[in-house]
């Protein structure tokens, strides 16, 4: 698919079986949960998908599985950033060959790089493939913030850099991306609880781990905002906000899995070194899921 991305993109969680291996069958069900919920795209091997705890072979398997299960229904965005430029290029070429629509590239997240080193890495990966690139700004993990003017310059100089996922949680920075550089790059906000503000500000969309749990609800709010129905969007947002807030206030990956498990969807737990949530937090999330019976895995 080559059409312009917009709307709600699910940052897919990765279900693990009891032995710690990827549960491919449940991953396929999770893909269908989002697609059936109306999302505009799904993301394989993002941060919510725990890519940093996987081998390169596992990351390839997930991309192949997601592309196969989606079967052209929505775009697939594959996160292919890695610790080395060489591995990022290899993963990117594989994802392109596997049928991904867009590649999302996070900067290396161990060695503290300069902005020039990060820009060179991103250019090299983008030049190695033909499909669109989404920059992934995740300063909390990478130690490098891709400021709006750097992003705009990269998008103007590298033809296939067309999107950015900004997970800085800084709406002032997002506003600069949208208003200063919206002619060359489309901004997706990667902080779920900022959906209302982001779409109102003019973002192309949101990439949300919580869309694993409540895809149709987030899609409905986005559609209301796109149609100018702000009151409806606010009413629906207020209904899901307690659950959104509980997930965002806890360690995110185990919170997503706790919410899915509470909805009757067997997502398992996170892969170590991440640990599950304490029993009180799990119980609190479960009670909020139960208050929204439409989130049942029966969907």
Image (cartoon, rainbow, N blue to C red):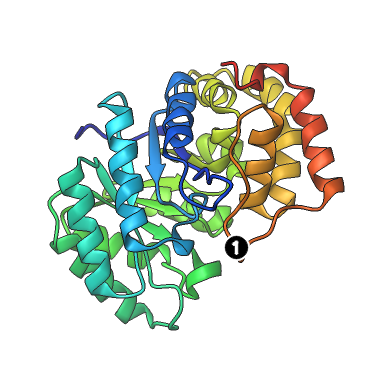
The residue shown at (43%, 31%) is 31
Name the quadrant of the C terminus: top right
The residue shown at (44%, 57%) is 51
The residue shown at (40%, 43%) is 43
| Residue 76 visible from this viewpoint | no
| Residue 89 visible from this viewpoint | yes
Q: Position of residue 30 (x, y in %)?
A: 48, 31
In this view, 107 is above or below 293: below
In this view, 146 is above or below 182: below
Q: Is residue 39 left or right of residue 102?
A: right
The residue shown at (44%, 52%) is 46
Q: Mark 1 falls on what kind of element?
A: loop
Q: Position of residue 3 (x, y in %)?
A: 22, 31
Q: Is residue 174 left or right of residue 183?
A: right
- Residue 56: which quarter of the image? bottom left
Farthest right residue? Answer: 280
> How many discs mark residues in the rendered view?
1
Q: Is residue 200 left or right of residue 188?
A: right
In terms of depth relative to the viewer, which is nearer, 241 or 272? Answer: 272
- Residue 180: which quarter of the image? bottom left
In terms of depth relative to the viewer, which is nearer, 27 or 76? Answer: 27
Name the quadrant of the N terminus: top left
- Local crowd size for mark 1, using a 10 Å CA cut-off: few (<14), some (14–19), many (≥20): few
Q: Position of residue 283 (x, y in %)?
A: 83, 39
In this view, 200 is above or below 299: below
In terms of depth relative to the viewer, which is nearer, 171 or 13? Answer: 13
Q: Position of residue 101 (x, y in %)?
A: 24, 40
| Residue on which the image places disc 1 | 272
């Amino acid at each position: 698919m080559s059409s312009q991305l917009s709307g709600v993109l699910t940052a897919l969680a990765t279900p693990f079986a009891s032995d710690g291996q990827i549960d491919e069958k449940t991953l396929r069900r999770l893909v269908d949960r989002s697609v059936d919920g109306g999302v505009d795209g799904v993301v394989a091997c993002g941060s919510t998908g725990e890519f940093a705890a996987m081998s390169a072979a596992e990351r390839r398997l997930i991309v192949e599985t997601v592309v196969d299960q989606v079967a052209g229904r929505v775009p697939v965005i594959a996160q292919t950033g890695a610790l080395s430029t060489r591995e990022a290029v290899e993963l990117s070429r594989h994802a392109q060959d596997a049928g991904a629509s867009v590649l999302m590239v996070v900067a290396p997240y161990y060695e503290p790089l300069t902005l020039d080193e990060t820009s060179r890495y991103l250019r090299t990966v983008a030049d190695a493939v033909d499909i669109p690139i989404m920059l992934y700004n995740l300063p909390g993990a990478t130690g490098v913030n891709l400021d709006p003017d750097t992003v705009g310059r990269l998008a103007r100089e590298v033809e296939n850099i067309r999107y950015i996922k900004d997970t800085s949680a800084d709406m002032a920075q997002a506003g600069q991306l949208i208003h200063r550089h919206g002619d060359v790059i489309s901004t997706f906000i990667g902080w779920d609880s900022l959906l209302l503000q982001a779409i109102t500000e003019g973002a192309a969309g949101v990439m949300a781990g919580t869309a694993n749990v409540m895809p149709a609800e987030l899609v409905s709010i986005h559609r209301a905002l796109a149609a100018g129905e702000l009151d409806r969007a606010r009413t629906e947002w207020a209904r899901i906000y307690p659950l959104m807030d509980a997930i965002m206030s806890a360690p995110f990956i185990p919170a997503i899995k706790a919410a899915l498990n509470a909805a009757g969807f067997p997502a398992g737990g996170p892969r170590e070194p991440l640990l599950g949530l304490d029993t009180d937090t799990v119980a609190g999330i479960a009670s909020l899921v139960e208050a929204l019976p439409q989130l049942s895995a029966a969907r």
